Amino acid sequence: MLARLLAKLYGSVWNLKRKCSSRNPFSSKIAKLIYGMYQYENNSSVAWNSTFKSEPCFPHGMKSIFISGETQIGHNCVIFQQVTIGSVTLSDAKGRGAPIIGDNVYIGSGAKIIGSVVIGNNVRIGANAVVYKDVPDNSVVVSNEQKTITKDKKLDNRFYTFLGKWMYFDKGAFHEVTDTDVLRSLSIIDPIKHS
């Protein structure tokens, strides 16, 4: 909340971000401090040295968005929640570097754009898609087609944890596991490492 109030002194968070690159070392340092606080409060990390041709649209706010340094983003980019636009910094990696994203790009929630990829203009990137190769103009990127595997028996989706003894979560509370088959299957898990 404090960082949001301090950012308003700069007019907007985008003006604050621009001040992070100020030639005045004191002004730049203060701006980076406030900008870092703002990012922390929003559980996001839009690097101060990422560049945008114009302010992007965050339909759900800047929360849970990660954009690494050196990333370049064009005009009219729409970025939904939980998006990662990240650099690859491993010295021996093929896709080393940061993404370059064109104009009028729509990035769906949970999408990941990783490495020195170039995303063209007028591109749509679907929810949860992972992009690690260049994308030409006027394209749509989708995640793999949904695959459904139907099982012959009822699936046990209870959450199990070791709390001095094996417990499962059901209807808002933890209950002791008494089913011997379940206990037998849980016995292969080291409860010390699991807890």
Image (cartoon, grey):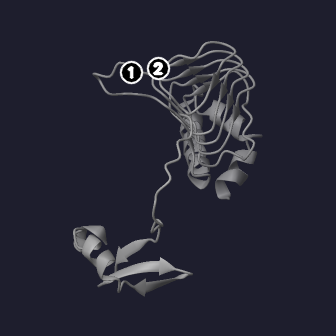
Q: 22 or 110, which is in the foreground?
A: 110
Write the residue at 42% across / 78% down: 168
Residue 92 percent coordinates (x, y)? 28, 21
Q: Which label belongs to residue 96?
A: 1
Give the spatial CA distance, label 2 vs label 1.
6 Å
Q: Earlier in the sequence, mark 2 or mark 1?
A: 1
**Residue 153 drawn above or below residue 109:** below
Write the residue at 53% across / 46% down: 148
Quadrant assignment for the C terminus: bottom left
Residue furthest out toward the front: 152
Residue 161 horizontal side relative to residue 53, left or right: left
Quadrant assignment for the N terminus: bottom right
Q: 142 or 185, which is in the foreground?
A: 185
Q: Find numbered disc 1 in the image and state the secondary structure of the residue it sits on.
A: loop
Q: What residue type is disc 2 on?
A: Ser
Residue 185 percent coordinates (x, y)? 28, 71
Label 1 Cα neighbours within 10 Å, binned few <14 / some 14-19 / many ≥20 = some
Residue 25 horizontal side relative to residue 15, left or right: left
Residue 32 percent coordinates (x, y)? 56, 40
Q: 191 or 49, which is in the foreground?
A: 191
User: What is the quadrant of residue 172 in the picture?
Assistant: bottom right
Q: Which residue is mark 2?
A: 116
Residue 167 percent coordinates (x, y)? 38, 81
Q: 162 or 65, which is in the foreground?
A: 162
